[in-house]
């Protein structure tokens, strides 16, 4: 007579636990990589927003000034730092003449974004155009 048993053997239970553990490990690793990617993406988006805001402010300052303010003969650089959402960002604002090659060399090891705009200022007799470059970097 055949011996019928309801249920699973110990071997079947252990095999199921091993398979489920492997699946859980793979899922947790992929979630870890995804959260790192989102963190890097969030920092870059924040840096872009900072650069865009700083560029708009600088262009507005230069375009409404009468007579023109801070007119540089070659190149002017402003630097500052901000902390947003617990991350530090370093901002460089470089102002140069359009007739010159921009005199800046950005060699940071940190990731960065940059934006450029042109300010047109009227100095009483003619228009003067200035190239504004905003560079924002952050720590990895």
Image (cartoon, rainbow, N blue to C red):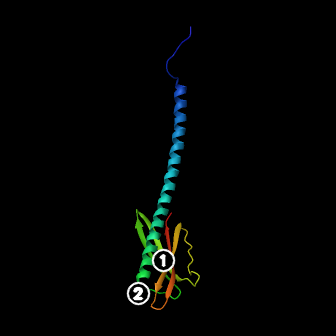
- Is residue 110 positioned above or below 29 on the image? below
Residue that protrudes farthest toward the front in the picture: 125
Q: Nearer the viewer, residue 128 or 138?
A: 128
The residue under the point 45% across, 66% down is: 49
The residue under the point 50% across, 50% down is: 32
Residue 106 coordinates in the image, percent (x, y) = 56, 74
In the image: residue 85, left or right of residue 118: left
Task: Name the residue tied to disc 2.
Answer: 66
Quote the CA–CA distance across marks 1 and 2.
Answer: 21 Å
Badge 2: residue crowd in 10 Å (few <14, some 14–19, many ≥20): few
The residue under the point 44% across, 67% down is: 88
Quadrant in the rendering for residue 46: bottom left
- Is residue 12 positioned above or below 76 on the image? above
In the image: residue 68, left or right of residue 15: left
Residue that protrudes farthest toward the bottom in the picture: 125
Residue 14 coordinates in the image, percent (x, y) = 53, 30
* Position of the N terminus by quadrant: top right
Q: Nearer the viewer, residue 10 or 30?
A: 30
């Amino acid at each position: 007579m055949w011996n019928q048993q309801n249920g699973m053997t110990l071997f079947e239970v252990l095999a199921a636990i091993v398979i489920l553990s492997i699946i859980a490990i793979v899922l947790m690793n992929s979630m870890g990589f995804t959260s790192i990617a989102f963190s890097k993406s969030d920092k870059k988006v924040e840096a872009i927003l900072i650069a865009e805001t700083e560029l708009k402010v600088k262009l507005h300052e230069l375009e409404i000034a009468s007579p023109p303010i801070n007119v540089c003969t070659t190149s002017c650089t402003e630097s500052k730092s901000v902390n947003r959402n617990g991350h530090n960002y370093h901002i460089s604002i470089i102002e140069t003449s359009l007739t010159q090659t921009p005199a800046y060399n950005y060699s940071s090891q940190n990731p960065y974004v940059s934006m450029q705009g042109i300010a047109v200022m009227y100095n009483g007799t003619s228009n003067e155009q200035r190239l504004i470059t905003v560079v924002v970097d952050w720590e990895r």
